Image (cartoon, rainbow, N blue to C red):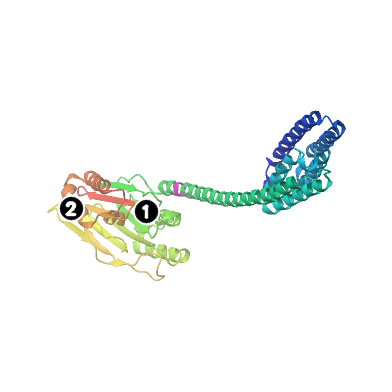
Amino acid sequence: MNLLETEEFPLLLRRGRWALALTESAISLFLALWYRERPPAAWVAMGLLLAYNMVVLAQLYRLSILRIPIRLLVVLDLLFLGNAAYYTGAATSPYLGLCYLIVFVAALFGDLKGGLGVGLLAGLMTVALGVMDNTNHWEIVRDTAPYFLIVGGFTGYLVTQMKTYFTRYQEGLARELQQKHTEQNHQHELELAREIQLSSLPREVPQVPGLSLVLRSEPSLEVGGDFHAFITDSATERLGLAVGDVAGKGIAAALVATSIGSLLPYLDPLRGAHHALVRLNKDLCGRLPATTFATLLYAEIEASAGTLRLWNAGHPPALIWRARDGHVESASCGQAPPLGLFAIWRAPEQELTLAPGDLLILHSDGITEARTQRGQSYFDEARLLEIIRAHAPHGPEALADAIFTALHEGGEPSDDLTLLLCQRNTLTV
């Protein structure tokens, strides 16, 4: 920003003019008393300078500052100082010392070009005073005139460099503030998206006779794509469980995950799971970018018979802990492609049986592929199986606590963590 465009410029110019007027008045009064042999001339010089400064001050307070040409004021300052110098000693007058101040001011407002121009004008004025001086003090002119040019040029050069540096500093500061503002807005959007995502996903597990459900879900530092859903049918005592993950992170993945988690129950998969998943895939193919997809594991449990049906769309397979012998079984057969990639999609159905005491484990890949914020892997499927064998006999709550304790002891996960446990308690007659 140019100095002339700042709000402080009018105040700066008025204060500077007052300082210059008071300085010139004090010097004029001193010289009028000092030059006793020529008192009329000294008093005339003082009167001219006072009148000139009063006129300039009146204009500064009356007119808009931007309407007053600063270069013209500087030139008039030199002319009136030269006139006062003519009456009080010409080339040897102390008034010429004030010309250095005027040259300096010109360099401040005009940079190198303005400083050189006014310095040259002051030097020529000194030469003219030397010519008009009866005593012909050419040595004083020789030693004075070049320094006006030097002061103007050197000061103008320094001012130019300082303005360049200050402009770069302002631009850098503006970029830094803009970047900080953008990061703050982005962080606020992430927090808002996380709140929306968490509020849209079910936090309470349904109460189904014969089944014990445990849900543990923790979002990462950034909003992610994990989602889960419960579908219940009190008439048939069937329960639908869904765990999924949208590729990627950020607000886009969170919005897709939220929409899938909200849409799936309305598709009523308990009346036809495969048909509902086909409709969901068609919807996602129609509105998602080509590089975005979602994995999904849908499980349907009939509590009375212990029947378990699974449909897997590219998600980590379900795990079943068998209460009879403590064996952990992986339901890895019949996996289909993720949702949202192919318009024609089919998924085979896998049917298993849950005996009383058996425990079904559904999880997101954030658990078996847990990595720290630095990308270091510290929890995998082998570690999960080890914890299941050790803690599943104590019930789903104890198992969930053990898994998440181990996850947080190893590091701070960089991905969302979703764990859904379902244990068949007793046979329903």
Choose mark 2 or mark 1, whichever is in front: 2
The answer to whether residue 252 is seen in the rendering is yes
Residue at image position (23%, 49%) is 423
Q: Nearer the viewer, residue 293 or 279?
A: 293
Q: Is residue 108 magenta?
A: no
Q: Is residue 301 left or right of residue 202?
A: left
- Foreground residue among 302 and 365: 365
Q: Single out the residue that lies furthest toward the bottom.
A: 344
The residue at which mark 1 appears reads as 227
Query: What x and y, as percent, mark residue 265?
Result: 39, 54
Mark 2 → mark 1, Cα distance in angstroms: 25 Å
Q: Is residue 429 shown to the viewer in this render? A: no
Under circle 2, the secondary element is helix
Crowdedness near tag 2: few (<14), some (14–19) or many (≥20) residues, C-alpha within 10 Å: few
Residue, far front: 135
Residue type, mark 2 in image: Glu
Instruction: Give the residue pinned by disc 2.
Output: 386
Q: Nearer the viewer, residue 279 or 292?
A: 292
Q: Position of residue 108 (x, y in %)?
A: 67, 46
Q: Amino acid at mark 1?
A: Phe
Chain part drawn in magenta: 189-193
Residue at 61%, 49% in the rendered image: 158
Locate residue 299, reporting x and y percent: 29, 57
Position in image of residue 46 (x %, y %): 82, 34
Q: For the stretch drawn in magenta, what is the main secondary structure? A: helix
> What crowding class fits label 1: few (fewer than 14 Cα within 10 Å), some (14-19), or many (20 or more)?
many
Does 21 appear above or below 304? above
